[in-house]
């Protein structure tokens, strides 16, 4: 009996060792730190769903989809005349919502096929007389909200509970009042996030953050002391932690917000050697992601662009 046990124990240990080694071999692949986008793409917006990352092209309206574990991808939504893609978000029904910049429109695509689902006119297209730039979008339980960098308004597209698409006649404009003061001729409101019954927006030119009552449009400046987030672009809210991309500064600010979202404390700012004017930010289990817009470089068909992954601070 003892001889049998002595023979069995080494076999069991060897089996456990093999299992451990096999576990390493079959572990889920790690996400790559740099995801290349097509040359000349000129990206701005970014969103993540599962292992797929989506980035939009400012001048063409195209949307590129890539796998965060391999870094490989392809164009999902082709370039289309008269379209643009600035901020983008995905909902739980596999739909991509796109802020259309100077077109004054919002575009809606199927995240699996890239097929057109809807086009909404939020405001007249940009002209000298009527400046507009539909910059970013956030999704709440019942609506898609869009910022306009040239007007003191937010645009609302309802999201029916049954998953159907709202009609053009349901699109509304919310005029903003309160603490927010716009400066003419420059980009003001940019990124937007949802905080329960409120919305949070950043004013790029001043670096101020505001909470917005989505019913009344009243804005309240969020007190972060003497700090500002000038060049604030994309926002990501995770619990009480707000990440603010400061694009041309190549920084991401991390702000711990109070439970009532009326105030906050700057925890840190961080950069990354791979940052090259990051604009918007998205989060996944594998980390945080920003897209490099590379504003200021001379764009050619060969100009490279990328998405950068990094750990949460």
Image (cartoon, rainbow, N blue to C red):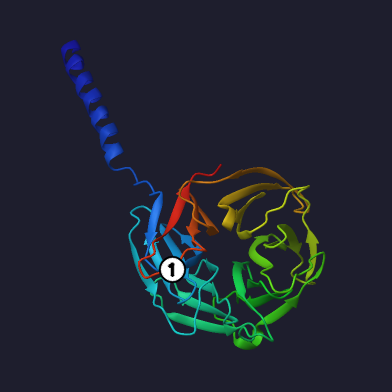
Percent position of residue 192, x then y: 64, 64
Is residue 262 placed above or below 21 in the rendered structure?
below
- Residue 22 in which image quadrant: top left
Residue sitting at x 41%, y 49%: 33
Image point (22%, 25%), residue name = 14
Q: Tell me the quarter of the image containing the C terminus.
A: top right
Structural crowding at the residue carrying mark 1, measured as other residues with C-alpha within 10 Å and reported as few (<14), some (14–19) or many (≥20): some
Residue indicated by mark 1: 299
Quadrant of image for the N terminus:
top left
Looking at the image, residue 262 sits to the left or right of residue 292; the answer is: right
Total of numbered circles in the picture?
1
- Which one is in front, 200 or 252? 252
Toward the right, the furthest residue is 178
Q: Where residue 114 appears, x then y in whole percent?
A: 41, 75
Quarter of the view holding residue 207: bottom right
Residue 237, above or below 152: above
Pick the residue in front: 3 or 143: 143
**Camera-side residue: 81 or 95?**
81
Query: Between residues 219 and 304, which one lies in front from this camera angle?
Result: 304
| Left or right, 177 with reference to 274 | right
Q: How far from the left and from the top, in percent, is residue 255?
A: 67, 48
Which residue: 52% across, 63% down? 296
Residue 92 screen position, x and y as percent: 51, 66
Left or right position of 46 against 133 = left
Name the element at disc 1: loop
| Whether residue 24 is visible | yes
- Tell which residue pokes out farthest to the top in this image: 2
Residue 67 seen in this snapshot: no
């Amino acid at each position: 009996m003892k001889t049998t046990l002595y023979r069995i124990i080494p076999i069991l240990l060897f089996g456990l060792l093999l299992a451990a080694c096999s576990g390493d071999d079959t572990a889920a692949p790690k996400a790559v730190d740099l995801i290349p986008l097509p040359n000349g793409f000129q990206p701005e917006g970014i969103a993540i769903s599962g292992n797929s990352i989506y980035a939009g092209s400012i001048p063409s309206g195209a949307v590129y989809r890539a796998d965060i574990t391999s870094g490989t991808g392809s164009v999902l939504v082709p370039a289309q005349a008269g379209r643009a893609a600035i901020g983008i978000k995905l909902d739980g029904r596999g739909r991509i919502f796109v802020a259309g910049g100077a077109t004054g429109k919002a575009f809606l695509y199927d995240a699996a096929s890239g097929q057109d689902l809807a086009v909404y006119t939020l405001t007249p297209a940009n002209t000298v007389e009527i400046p507009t730039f539909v910059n970013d979008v956030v999704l709440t339980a019942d609506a898609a909200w869009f910022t306009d960098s040239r007007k003191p308004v937010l645009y609302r597209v309802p999201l029916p509970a049954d998953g159907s698409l709202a009609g053009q006649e349901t699109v509304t404009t919310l005029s903003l009042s309160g603490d927010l003061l716009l400066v003419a001729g420059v980009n003001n409101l940019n990124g937007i996030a949802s905080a329960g019954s409120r919305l949070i927006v950043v004013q790029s030119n001043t670096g101020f953050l505001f909470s917005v009552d989505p019913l009344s449009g009243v804005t309240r400046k969020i007190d972060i002391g003497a700090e500002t987030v000038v060049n604030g672009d994309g926002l990501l809210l995770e619990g009480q932690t707000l990440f603010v991309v400061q694009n041309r500064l190549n920084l991401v600010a991390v702000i711990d917000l109070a439970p009532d979202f009326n105030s906050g404390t700057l925890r840190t700012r961080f950069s990354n050697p791979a940052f090259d004017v990051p604009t918007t930010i998205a989060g996944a289990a594998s980390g945080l992601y920003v897209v490099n817009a590379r504003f200021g470089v001379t764009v050619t068909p060969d100009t490279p662009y990328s998405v950068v992954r990094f750990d949460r601070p």
